[in-house]
Structure formats: structure tokens, C-alpha cells
Amino acid sequence: MVLKRAPAGLSVNPPRDPNTLSNYNDWRTQHVTANLEVDFERRRLWGGVVLRLRSLTEGESESVVLDGSFLKIEDVKVDGKGCNWSVAGRTEPYGSPLIVKLDGGVEKGKEIEMEITLSTTDQCTALQWMAPAQTPNKKHPYMFSQCQAIHARSVFPCQDTPDVKATVDFNIRSPLPVVASGLPTGSKDFQPGKDGKSGTLLYTFKQEIPIPSYLFAVASGDLATASIGPRSTVVTGPEELEGCKWELEDDMEKFLEAAEGIVYPYAWTTYNVLVLPNSFPYGGMENPTFTFATPTIISKDRQNIDVIAHELAHSWSGNLVSNASWEHFWLNEGWTTYIERRIQGVIHGEPHRDFSAIIGWKALKDSIDRYGEDHDFTKLVVDLKGKDPDDAFSSIPYEKGFVFLYYLEKLVGIEKWDKFIPHYFNEFKFKSVDSYEFKSTLLNFFASDPAASKKLTDLDWDKWFYAPGYPPKPDFDQSMVKACYALADEWKTRTDGHDSSSFKPKSSDIADWSANQSVVFLETIQSWASPPKAEDVELMGETYGYANSANVELVSRYFSIGLGARCKAVYKPTAELLGTVGRMKFVRPLYRMLEMCDRALAVSTFERNREFYHPICRAMVEKDLFGEEKK
Ligand code: BES
Ligand code: ZN
């Protein structure tokens, strides 16, 4: 018999995820044990990870290739013995894989245990390390991870693809409290510090549901905990705790129950929220059992916790059923946006669902305008071969994905559609899914229903998946946006240069509005073909309190209107805001606008704050301001 052998480092079977260098079709990670110590002084995680890997071929693959990026690998052992390993050169943007040779391969189904001794480096893209001065109470250092999309490989070598799922044991040693994306199993084993260093405690967590690498998460700092529901806690700095508790405690369990009614019971036992310092680069990150969230959701008005409904929804879409690669990201975010809005509908009524969808359509329009209607990244299913998924990130998978699911709901009728939802999430529970499997599952489910089946098979699937630009615009309920559009129209009479405009703004214009109605009002003004007059922008900021609002959703949109109008009064406050908020949703558009007004101010603001931003945010703004050259 002639044995078929793949050349060293080359996989026998090409993977469906183009954004990993690992040969995950030859080997499959079953379990990860992370034994890591948080070293705040040297700003690194160090220790070891043990990967249990199963061979998927008949010994044809003689090497295990794992993703890695900017890691310092000290040693690799397989089943307790030394082995032949090397780190390949970098392939941007995918990093430098670790190649471990296993002469003769391993029989199909057999498992090996690979122990890797390592430390992270200061080029690690997933971790942010903060000095005490950068934290709210300025007393202790802080660190947190953000692994989505392909940054887990900068924490430890792994099959860094959402197509592979493994259970995880976290054993994290730190001088400060730790959270991780698993259930705590109790902290134990104190070790006193030497040479004036503080002692450390071992914090242990278990994730018994298999998760993809991008959901691996740790954070450590001066953390306190409070209850926000029967199965939920919030963790944050001691001074912020009361405020965070107030913001979340009314809705947390309601969100959980609403989501369970739409899909099926929550699988992860507890749902908790870690509210991070200001530099957290996203609104929220759905790390299992512990959503990581930006402090900008704590706006003291309970108006921005839709982010939590969103991250909670990921407990089903994304965390139990994961997109198989970032090319099918819409299956994570489109489904999650859809469920998030169904939750809003259950709690606040149907008009709220459509209201939120109208805000979403505006976000879709902004993204399509920015890329151009023919751009590849405006497709639902994208081609990411050779690309960095961070570069393809936009509202498109969220909102085009949402519109597609909303369209399907209307097409088959909500009663039937509601039966499909749990079916789909059961079918792919603990698995990864691509758009073609989604399609076939939907068609199969309705195969015995001739009316629905005909509509679904007649659907132009290729157009939905691959046509760039806008999907058909749904007919959303306009009841909650009417007042916002009407007020914007009043302001327009001033802008259009009618000196005769009789409109005199007063604070009572928006007195009974929700913050999101102000968002719609501000976004309507943002979409005008010509900007308002600079003096009108100032008047608006004072009259409606937008200029000094604690709600960053409002203040950032207000500044953006001001920058569009070249209103000098907002330049400095924008630069100040950019030094206190690190959420990319706000940071990137504000830099783009500020650069158009005053490039020198944009550049100096960025240089002053570069250490404040998370590495991912820093890299993206750097690309926005300086192009690809300065890396
Ligand atoms: N999973 C995303 C955040 C993310 C996406 C991180 C891609 C890295 C790469 C999270 O669930 C999310 O969508 N957050 C939104 C919340 C919003 C849509 C309510 C955010 O950060 O703004
Ligand atoms: Zn999301």
C-alpha cells in the first residue's frame, strides 16, 4: 500500500476557514488547559497551555500546525516527551504558525497531549495592559483580552478558527481578582510574593461547553461583584459597582426570559457582565458566562443596555451555534441582531423592534456609502482569502443579516418562522455552521409545507448571499420615528437659509423622548446633503443638552454633526472625548471627521492617546489616519 503523505506543514484536507494557518482538518483540538500567570510588571501572561488534539487522518499528517502570533515559545512536549518543533516566519495578517513534527503521524481517532510553555510579548494584539493611572480609581493595574476575530493566536498557539470548538480549563494565577469565559470553580492556593512583590492567588474556571478560540477570555484587576438577577452578576471597579448594578438589575432577568422564550433555555448556567475601563474597544463582547462590556453603556438612564440584550443573544447565535469562518459572520451577528430586536419587542412592544431596525438601516446605509455599493465587503457572504477579518468589520453583516432574517420571517409568516428558530439552534448546537448549511436546513425544515417551501426555493439565494449593496428595504413601522423626523424638518427651515424661519428650539422639544429618539433625530441631520450652520449646531447642543451629555451615543453624534458643519466649538471637546473613550464605534468615525477639519489636531490627539487605546483600536485608527504604511 502506498501511503499518502502531505508535504511537511501542508494539510491533507484544505479547511473551510481561510483565516487560519492551522491544519485543523487533520487534527482537532478537544480540550485546552490554560495554566497562566498574570505578570503586571512585565505586562505578559506566561506559563503553559496543554492542548488535547485528536488525529483525524490515518496517520497521514506528520505535523501539527497551530496558529501563533508574536508569542515567545519556550518549549513543546508531546505526551510528556520533547519533540521537533519550530516557529515559521510571519505571513501577514495571520501570524507565525508553530509547527510540531510527529514522525509517522498518529492513527485516526487517537489523541495526543501537547504541552506548550510560553509567554506573550509586548506585541500581543489581544491583550491590553493598563497602568494604575489608566484605571478609574488609579490604584491597581488592569489587563483584559479581546480575542475575536483572530487574536487568540497572540495569547497561545491554537487552532484559531471558529470551525473548531473545545472545552477549556482556566487556571489563572494573579495578584488581583480574575474573570474568565468559564464558570468559576473557586479560587485556591495562595502563594506569597517574594522580593517585595505581591502574592498571587490561583483562580480556576471551567468551560464544559465546547467553545471556539475567539471566545477564550480573561481579565484581571481591582474588581468587585454585585448581583443583577437570580442568575447574573455584574463585575467592575469597586467605585463603579453601584452605578452598574442600577443600570442592569431591572432588565437582566427579563432579557434572559425573553430570549429563552424565543429560542430555548439558556445553556451556560449563569450570565454575567464585566464592565471594563473606557479603553474597551467594542460595545460588548459575548465571552461565554461573562460578557465584556464598555462602560459607555452605563449612561445613568438605562438607555444603552440594548448592548446587553445583544451580547446575551449571542449565547445562542455565535456561542452555541458559531459561524464556521469569518466569511459567514452574518450568521453570528445577523441572527444576534435579529434576536436582540425580538427581545426588545417582547419587553417594550413591537414598535420598539422596528424603531431599532430603522436605526440599524441607517447604520447599514452609512457602511454601504463608505465602502461603495459595489464593494465586496457589502455582500452578506464575503471572500476573506488573504484578508484580515478586522478590515471587513462593519454594520453590514449585522444589518443586512438582520434584514434577510426579517424578510424570511415575513415570507413564511411569523408563526411558522418561530418554530424554525429553535430547530435551527438545536440542529447546530455545539457546532459551527456556514451559509449553505443554513440554507439547506431552512429548506429541509419547510420541505413538507408546500406553500412556504415554494417561496423559499423560489428565493434568489445567490442574490441575497453575493449581491453587493442594498437588500430590499423592509416596510418598518414608523410610529416612533415620526416625531424625530418632524423636529429635524423644523431645524431644516433654519439651515435652508430662510431667515424668516419661525422655528425657535426649546428644551421641551425633546422632553419626553428616549435617548434613541434623539439618536434618530441627530442621524437625520447627519444625513442632510448640506450640513447645518455652525451657530445652529451650537444652539442645538446647548438647548438639548447634547454637548454635555453623559450618553456617548448622543454626544459623539452631536460632535460629528458639529465637525461636518466645521463648527470650531466642538473641535476641542471632540479631541477630549477621544482621550476618554476607546470604543471603536465612536473613535474611528470621530477621527475620520476630525481629520477632515484639522488633520494636525487629529494626529496630535491620536499620538497623545495611543497608549490609552487597545492594540486593535490603535492599529485601526493608525490605518485610518496614516494608511497601511505606518504599522
Ligand atoms: N462580537 C461583537 C464584537 C466584535 C465583533 C468583536 C467582531 C470583534 C470582532 C459584539 O457582539 C458586538 O456586536 N458588539 C456591538 C454591540 C452592538 C451591536 C449592540 C458593539 O461592539 O458595538
Ligand atoms: Zn454581536
Image (cartoon, rainbow, N blue to C red):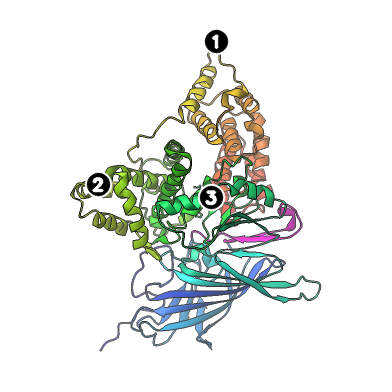
Three-letter amino acid code of the residue under disc 3: Ile
375 is within the stretch colored magenta: no
Quadrant assignment for the N terminus: bottom left
Q: What residue is shown with label 2?
A: 460
Relative height, residue 513 to residue 284 (above, below): above
* Sooner in the amino-acid sequence: mark 2 or mark 1: 2
Q: Does residue 265 appear to the left or right of 6 in the view shown?
A: right
Three-letter amino acid code of the residue under disc 2: Asp
Q: What residue is shown with label 3?
A: 308
* Residue bounds of the magenta highlight: 126-149
Q: Residue at x 59, y 42 (%)?
A: 302
Determine the image quadrant of residue 603.
Answer: top right
Q: Does residue 192 appear to the left or right of 585 in the view shown?
A: right
* Sooner in the amino-acid sequence: mark 3 or mark 2: 3
127 is within the stretch colored magenta: yes
Q: CA distance from mark 3 to mark 2?
A: 34 Å
Please give the label number shown on residue 500: 1
Q: CA distance from mark 2 to mark 1?
A: 52 Å
Measured from the top left, where is residue 26 in percent x and y?
Answer: 37, 76
Secondary element under disc 2, as helix, strand or loop, is loop
Q: Nearer the viewer, residue 563 or 352?
A: 352
* Mark 3 CB within 8 Å of ligand 1: no
Secondary element under disc 3, as helix, strand or loop, is helix
Label pair 2/1, CB-CB below 8 angstroms: no
* Sooner in the amino-acid sequence: mark 1 or mark 3: 3
